[in-house]
Image: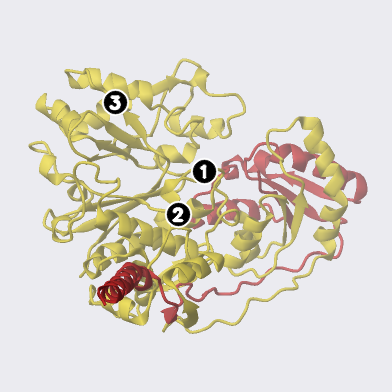
Chain colours: A red, B yellow
Amino acid sequence: MKNRTLRSGLTVFISLACVFALTPIALTKETKQEWQVLNPEGVVKIEPMNVNPHPPTLEGKTVMLRWNGKHNGDKFLEKVGELLIEKVKDIKIIKSWEVAPETVDPITGSQERSREFAKAIVKFKPDLVIGAQSD
Amino acid sequence: MDQLNLEKMGIPTVTISSSEFIGLAKDTAIGQGAADLSFVIVPHPMGMIPLEEIRKKADLVFPEVLRMAIEWKPAAKLPPMKPVYPAGRLKWKGTVEDINRIFFEKGLSLGLPILPPTPERVAKVLKGTSRRPDELLGMVPPRMGALTVELVAIHAAMAGCKPEYMPVLIAALEALLDPRANWRGLTTTTATSSILVIVNGPVIYEIGLASRQGAAGSGHHANASIGFAINLIADIVGGSRPPTPDKSLLGGPGDFVCWVFGENQLALPQGWEPYHVDRGFKKTESVVTIMGVYPPVDNIDHWSMTPEEHINWWANLVTPLLSIGGPCWISQMEQPHIVALGPEHAQLIAGAGWSKDQFRRAFWEKARIPFSAWPKGCPNTDLLVKKLGPVNPDIPIPITLTPEEFQVVIAGGAGKHSHFFAPFPGCFPVSKPVKK
């Protein structure tokens, strides 16, 4: 009788100990839930701009080579200019860094400055501008 | 990109870009409304290679240059615009960890944990401002994401901002959206640039923004969460993620959390006005000033006993060549530079009876290097001559054209350090009042 009581008591004790030990683990286990969240991306709002048609030929046209000041951009464009003169009849090549050195700046920095550079280039009435950008 | 302005003025263009930067070039074009533009891709790099090699690259791509010049026609169109408000809703099932993983995988977070922006959380943050949630603050470059007050609150919630931080956060964003801030340049450059946010006025104390010891560092909830929210907006709404269009070569912690600190107005020397008063605001106003900057130089002068000795330290640390680890673009000579004086350095200077103006002038006159030290191949030296007049090898070149370009702020706490922030090219400080 005593042994039975002891065994029962031990069983209850062990069961209770297991419940107390496992409950924290059960409580800390993160449960999956349904989430509804607001999209942080936002929509794009851009006013479209027109881009210009290219001339069907460069023969007899004026092409401005525009260097922004990054290293070797001028050397690259000089070679392009040489090849254009070789391959295209009556083409006129203008180099921006020679005729408008104020437009040579690797980091334009602002839209206003960029517009000033563009105005300085447009004065030469090019039919096409080839710009070397980076890097 | 200057070719876009040429197109707007009626000139067709062909843009040569190296292969590593074509993504940025295309994103820039789209961001300014050109769904398609004529590009020719050259194998990277173009810079810092011998003459023979760059000419070979020109030979290689010339047929494409010629083809683009005469045959190119635009093919793509911009997608139709959607309403900017209210923000869309996303639904997922998972744990907070799952939501963080999903957000990161979809490019909706930066890699640090965020709080999921539930409608309830965002509504709570919105209570911190009287601004309408549908108010459009502007378009965040380079992606030109429309930033409404609601969207600010979404990111503020993600960053863990308290509602009372919203007015400071909105003022910082209004300043960044100002063209003078050059936010586009700042977020797409190869440079290690970041955003500097300086707060002045009563709001510092109202929201518990740190302005003293370690103000720009860890342990300050307002500073950190506002700085985190700004960069979340830059990367997610503005789309400025590495490797394109964010071309940061190395990047840095400033890409996660901006520099945010209050000026230590309690440590202002007698007779020195707070920074926002220098910038034209009343002392009683709360103001946020932002600027795009390079990592600062730390002046660790522990020894000077006079302002003159202290100025010598500055002159050896920052010059036109040393302030950003290379020759300044000439345009930076017309941009303000921030001198964040530690309180003890400020007391040394003011204690000798110097005003801020005297300090600026002494700094400007001393922090120079001779023209002969300018590296060969540095661009725009003829522009330097235009700005300064005829230069000979011995003429000392200043950092800025005038001493007024040094803007003085009192920053940090006890100790003997000050910091010099050179501006990213094209970035000017922009100040906006804090509106509740």
Res. B172 image quadrant: bottom left
Q: Which of B3 and B245 is in front in this view?
A: B245
- The disc at residue B300 is 3
First in sequence, mark 1 or 2: give its number. Answer: 2
- The disc at residue B118 is none
- The disc at residue B182 is 2
Res. B432 image quadrant: bottom left
Q: Residue under mark 3: which chain is it in?
A: B
Q: Residue under mark 1: which chain is it in?
A: B
Image position, residue B227 (x, y; %): 34, 56
Secondary element under disc 2, as helix, strand or loop, is loop
The amino acid type, in three-letter code, at marker 1 is Ala
Quarter of the picture containing the N terminus of chain B is bottom right
First in sequence, mark 3 or 2: give its number. Answer: 2
Do the dots labelled 3 and 2 sit on one chain? Answer: yes
Secondary element under disc 1, as helix, strand or loop, is loop
Which residue is denoted by mark 1 in the rendering?
A: B191
- Name the mark nearer the viewer: 1 or 3: 3
Secondary element under disc 3, as helix, strand or loop, is loop
Q: Nearer the viewer, residue B96 or B287?
A: B96
Q: Where B195 falls versus B315 (above or below)?
A: below
Q: Residue under mark 2: which chain is it in?
A: B
The amino acid type, in three-letter code, at marker 2 is Asn
**Is B390 left, or right, of B23 in this rendering?**
left
Res. B377 image quadrant: top right
